[in-house]
Image (cartoon, grey):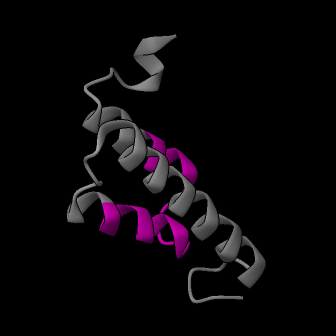
Amino acid sequence: MTDGGISDEEKARRLEAWESASWNQFLSSGIPFSADAQARAMRWVNGEVTRAERASELRAVLGLPPASEAE
């Protein structure tokens, strides 16, 4: 287990998913994620925030309403 309470396998899976998303963002727009976005993502990779908290942060960054309002 890592310090964030998730297994090393889960941490590796999350890191791979983030690297893929980051690369896809760069390929599609030519603009890499900001340092702030990278730092927030690493908090999720390391198990410091829940998936719901991360989704909420992403919705806010994208200017979308909270999930409770979107339904």
With 61 as the anchor, is 7 left or right in this view? Answer: right
**Residue 69 shown left or right of residue 52 in the figure:** left
Relative height, residue 3 to residue 31 (above, below): below
- The dominant secondary structure in magenta is helix
Instruction: State the image quarter where residue 43 is shown.
Output: bottom left
Q: Quadrant of residue 15?
A: bottom right
Residue 2 x %, y %:
64, 88
Confirm whether the magenta stretch covers residue 50.
Answer: yes
Q: Nearer the viewer, residue 51 or 33?
A: 33
Q: Quadrant of residue 14?
A: bottom right
| Range of residues picked out in magenta | 38-55
- The percent position of residue 58, horizontal first and vertical second, equals 37, 41
As for residue 19 lying within the magenta part, the answer is no
User: In the rendered image, which quarter contains the N terminus?
Assistant: bottom right
- Tell me which residue sits at (46%, 20%) in the image: 68
Rendered residue at 57%/80% (across/down): 4
Q: Is residue 30 above or below residue 22?
A: above
Q: Which is more toward the observer, 38 or 65?
A: 38
Residue visible at 52% across and 10% down in the picture: 71
- Figure check: 18 above or below 71: below
Residue drawn at x 29%, y 54% is 33
* Residue 44, image x, y percentages: 49, 64
Reply above or below: 50 against 5. Answer: above
Spot occupied by residue 17 in the image (x, y as percentages of width and height): 61, 58
User: Is residue 29 shown left or right of residue 17?
Assistant: left
